[in-house]
């Protein structure tokens, strides 16, 4: 029984150490921000201690670490390169779909990433031949 308890505790710590994504959500009264960074090639400790710590003046955020970014993003900058380094990550955007065109341009022109628009997950649109 003690071995099972120890194994469970160690597995819990290991899964925390292996989290490859961080969900960043604003928790202040300003314009909501919700995004997730999926690590591709950033050293784990650097990812956790630097890349997942937003530095925006006069804003506060809650950061949650997880294995993968949640579904529901309206856009993903896949395989984005961080400025000045060769590290790669995919950035999932959830906040404001109207920001998509600007984020897409930034993704492709400055981050050397590829923009992906996941399929709409709501009600299926009516087909053209269902009159």
Image (spheres, helix red, strand yellow):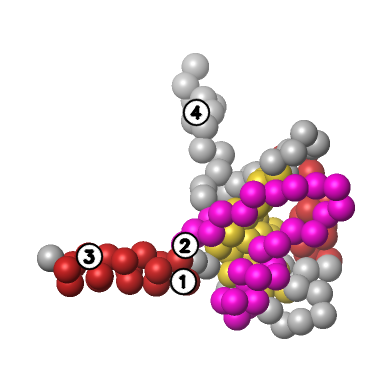
Q: Which residue is mark 2?
A: 67
Residue 95 found in image quarter:
top right
C-beta proximity under 8 Å, tags 1 and 2? yes
Sequence-earlier tag: 2 or 3 = 3
Left or right for 63, reference 110: left
Q: Which residue is mark 3?
A: 5
Of 49 and 117, nearer the camera is 49
C-beta proximity under 8 Å, tags 4 and 2? no
C-beta proximity under 8 Å, tags 4 and 3? no
Task: Give the extent of the magenta segment.
Answer: 42-69
Badge 3 marks a residue whose secondary structure is helix
For the point 74% across and 38% down, the residue is 28
The relative height of residue 61 versus residue 91 in the rendered view (above or below) is: above
Give the image location of residue 130, x and y in percent: 47, 21
Task: Tell me if I can see residue 109 in this picture.
Answer: yes
In the image, which is nearer the foreground, mark 2 or mark 3?
3
């Amino acid at each position: 029984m003690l071995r099972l308890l120890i194994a469970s505790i160690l597995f819990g710590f290991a899964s925390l150490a292996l989290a490859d994504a961080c969900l960043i959500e604003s928790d202040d009264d300003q314009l909501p921000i919700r995004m997730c960074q999926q690590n591709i090639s950033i050293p784990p400790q650097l990812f956790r201690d630097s890349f997942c710590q937003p530095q925006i003046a006069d804003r506060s955020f809650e950061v949650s670490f997880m294995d993968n970014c949640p579904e529901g993003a309206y856009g993903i900058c896949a395989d984005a390169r961080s400025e000045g380094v060769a590290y790669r990550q995919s950035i999932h955007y959830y906040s404001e779909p109207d920001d998509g065109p600007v984020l897409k341009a930034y993704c492709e022109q400055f981050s050397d990433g590829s923009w992906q628009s996941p399929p709409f997950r709501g009600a299926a649109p009516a087909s053209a031949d269902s009159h």
